[in-house]
Amino acid sequence: MAHDPTPGRAETRPLVIACGALASELRAVLRHHGLDGAVDVRYLPAHLHNRPEGITPAVEELLVEHAGRPAFVAYADCGTGGHLDAMLVRHPGVDRLLGAHCYEVFAGPQLFAALHEEEPGTFFLTDFLARHFEALVWQGLGLDRHPELRSMYFGNYRRVVLLTQSEDSTVVESGRRAADRLSLVFEHRHVGRQGLDAVVAVAVHRSAA
């Protein structure tokens, strides 16, 4: 989380409210473009992935707290069922990442649609979800305590597709192990971090403005 280091000085940098699951990727993108200090990034807890009803009120709380500053929401719809977009109507000029979820953000709409059409029973993972599969998926869904629930949750799935942002081979191995735990076929597609370029555009254009 970035903050203005100057005591008593009003913050003027654009505000980015981001999902904690995007922290590593967003930092890498901003660092790559030399924009580490160009935006004030506030990360919300990644566990909201499993509690999407909490995303909209948490985002709006920060928008209200920082009213008057240019802002961008680094979330897709992420399971809010349109509530995030409905809330943003009350905050003109505040946009969010395009897409239904982070998988579509990273893969892009065309590739994501193709993968889904190819096999509707696809469970997607990103770098973050592959690294934290045990805590967020296995334990988060109670499969560590009730493994018999696996068929209930994943009985209609046929494969795991890992959409990687980094070139870290350990992420691929984590994704492969996750597929094994779920007894699903494993596939890997490297998609990079271009889906977060919208945040870079905000940093550049709104800072210049």
Image: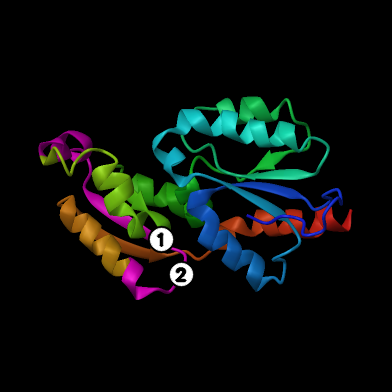
**Which one is in front, 110 or 133?**
133
- Label whose residue precedes the other's in the sequence (2 or 1): 1
Using the image, tell me which numbered label, if any, was put on residue 170: none
Secondary structure under the numbered disc 2 in the rendered image: loop
Secondary structure under the numbered disc 1 in the rendered image: helix
Residue topped by disc 1: 127
What is the basis of the colouring in this image? Answer: rainbow
Quadrant where the N terminus sits is bottom right
| Amino acid beneath label 1 | Asp
Residue 166 picture location, percent across and down: 46, 69
What span is in magenta?
A: 148-171
Quarter of the view holding residue 17? top right
Q: Looking at the image, which residue is at 37% across and 46% down?
A: 116
In the rendered view, tell whether residue 37 sits above or below residue 42: below
State yes or no: discs 2 and 1 in contact (Cβ < 8 Å): yes
Residue topped by disc 2: 166
